[in-house]
Amino acid sequence: MKRLEGKVAIITGAAGGIGKGMATAYVKEGAKVAIIDINKELGEQTIKELQAYSPESIFIQANLMEHDKLKDIVAEVVAKFGKLDILINNAHASKQASFEETTQDMLDLSFNTGFYPTFYFMQAALPYLKETKGKIINFASGAGINGNPKQASYAAAKEAIRGITRVAAGEFGQYGINVNIISPIANSPGIQQWAQHAPDDYNAMLERIPMRRLGELESDLGRVAVFLGSEDSDYITGQTIMVDGGAIMLR
């Protein structure tokens, strides 16, 4: 039996990148997924690939900055599949700037696409996850844990997500719901573009990673997400899992 056989998952920002890697790993393990993304063309292309493994999986185009509509997405998924087992809050957009040059618009973009959707999706999913003793996987970043330069708005939103994840883990444990964080370094399309434009900076980053490589989207990030979505992680909650080749070793 596959590890996620019969499970239903919502994955945001899953038309490409890390989200697509997780969705691919999920359908190969027997899950039905609803991928949520603003990019209609890419989302439709990705769902066709996923349906080769999971014909019932669906794509829902959505602007996650429309916070009042997020509960409707959860309701639509539950109406389609009859339940919800796993919520993965992966989507996030931000702009880089020095602390001094960070604007209200930059803060709003980061919180409105990352923190608030994570919060409201968790609220909306909670009644259904209580029924299934489900899982929530949120995303943090070394930008917040280390305080990377020129990432004030992104770091602030990511650390806020870590904060509410710990609160939710403490409150939701009584319902058998696990709430955890993945903090990745991944071989994403954005990183690949950066490597082409700034090869010296890219190579310097690799040198700071003990494993001397980036995480692969499906085989590294996706497999950890499968573990956190499966029964194998039933006694793990409130934790930040560093999927970064050892770049940050939490103490």
Image (spheres, rainbow, N blue to C red):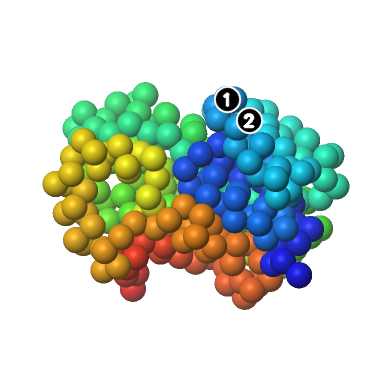
Residue 247 in the image, given as x and y percentages of width and height: 29, 63
Residue type, label 1: Glu
Residue 131 in the image, given as x and y percentages of width and height: 81, 58
Give above or below for 197 relative to 53. Answer: above
Residue 90 in the image, given as x and y percentages of width and height: 52, 45
Q: Residues within 10 Å of mark 1 (few under 14, many from 20)?
A: few
Q: Which residue is mark 2?
A: 44
Q: Which residue is mark 1?
A: 41
Q: Residues within 10 Å of mark 2 (few under 14, many from 20)?
A: some
In depth, the one of 190 and 164 nearer the eye is 190
Residue 217 in the image, given as x and y percentages of width and height: 46, 52
248 relative to 184 in the view: left or right: left
Element at label 1: helix
103 relative to 62 in the view: left or right: left
The residue that appears at 39% across and 52% down in the rendered structure is 186
Marks 2/1: CA distance? 5 Å
Do residues under tags 2 and 1 come within 8 Å of each other at their CB atoms?
yes
Element at label 2: helix
- The part of the image, by quadrant, that contains residue 241 is bottom left
Residue type, label 2: Glu
